[in-house]
Amino acid sequence: MEDAPVFIVGAPRSGTSLLYRILQRHSAFKPSSLNLEETDIFQHIWRLPFVRGHRPTSLFNYMLCDENAYRAFVETIRPLRMLSAVLLIPNAVLRNGATWWWRSVNQSDLVLRAYFHFAKHARGCNRLVEKTTENWRFTDRLVGAFPRCRMLYLSRHPVEQFASYRRRLKDDPSARWAALSVSRFCSDYETSTQRVLRACEDGSSLLVLRYEELTSQPEETFGRICEFVGVPVELEALHETNPEGIEWAPDPHLFGDITATTKQWRDLMTPSEAAEIEKRLAPLMKTLGYTPLAR
């Protein structure tokens, strides 16, 4: 099912890396070596004229650093790179919008299909799974290029999600992207969740799951995921053996068994911050089935 990749499209700090790791342990998606690279392809696609060598590194790394596959991809899109050079300025302006422009003028569907075609062979898997948490912005482009694709979006209780940002910044001070204010976090949560819920109304390509379901009821939730993406259930994918002995300091829980509780939000934020988040996001929390924690 080369034309039916699975894309994990968000949300950040909501267990997407955990889900990415689990799916790569499934025989349908298993690459020749574990690789949790996010391609960020839509952040690079407008800069096609500069794709060469090993750049952008995220695209090269997702291909498991396969020189031949990456060179073949770059060569295949040579005419489109020339077109992109002519359109560089408008593409820079429209890179996060104007789906019609990208698909009709830039022929970005061809770029996406070419990249993931060569990536599949480079990774040595039967079917592709890819995670970029900001791709909730581009679900329409993914479906346009791959009408049979499946997309997964993990939501999380907003207080727990904000606390996860705080913990990442605490453990990794260089991760400045995690230094969100309460106001900015709420704005991002509203924008992404509302966009994804609207996308769910447009078709059956996107499934919204709750992080809490994945961690508290992993077998049942994984069964739903497998049914949605069209693969048999392999419960052994839920159990981490970590044969390569991978350790990642910013998130020591990523390569261990699934754990329902990995932190206490009160250790990372104040009750007043939690109350502010829950007040602003109350309608979305109700839609997603979340109850207040700041009491």
Image (tube, helix red, strand yellow):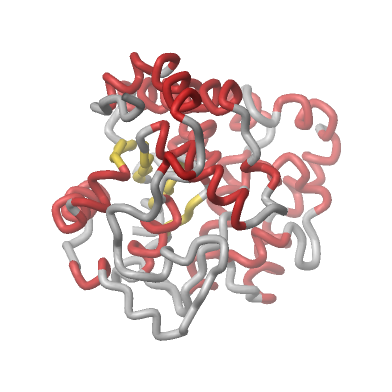
State the residue in front, 46 or 38.
38
Q: Residue at 42%, 50% (x, y): give it.
A: 16
- Left/right of residue 51 with respect to residue 42 in the rendered view: right
Q: Residue at 45%, 41% (x, y): give it.
A: 10
Q: Quick one: quadrant of the N terminus?
A: bottom left
Residue 118 drawn at (x, y percent):
56, 65
Placement of 207 over or under 183, stated as above or below: below
State the residue in front, 178 or 272.
272
- Looking at the image, the residue that sits furthest to the left is 220
Q: Quick one: quadrant of the C terminus?
A: top left
- Left/right of residue 206 with respect to residue 59 in the rendered view: left
The number of discs equals 0
- Left/right of residue 284 with respect to residue 233 in the rendered view: right
Q: Residue at 16%, 58% (x, y): give it.
A: 219
Residue 138 drawn at (x, y percent):
53, 34
**Residue 152 falls in which quadrant of the image?**
top left
Residue 278 drawn at (x, y percent):
39, 21
Placement of 237 over or under 192, stated as above or below: below
State the residue in front, 68 or 193.
193
Residue 111 drawn at (x, y percent):
62, 48
Placement of 286 over or under 69, stated as above or below: above
Q: Residue at 18%, 48% (x, y): give it.
A: 224
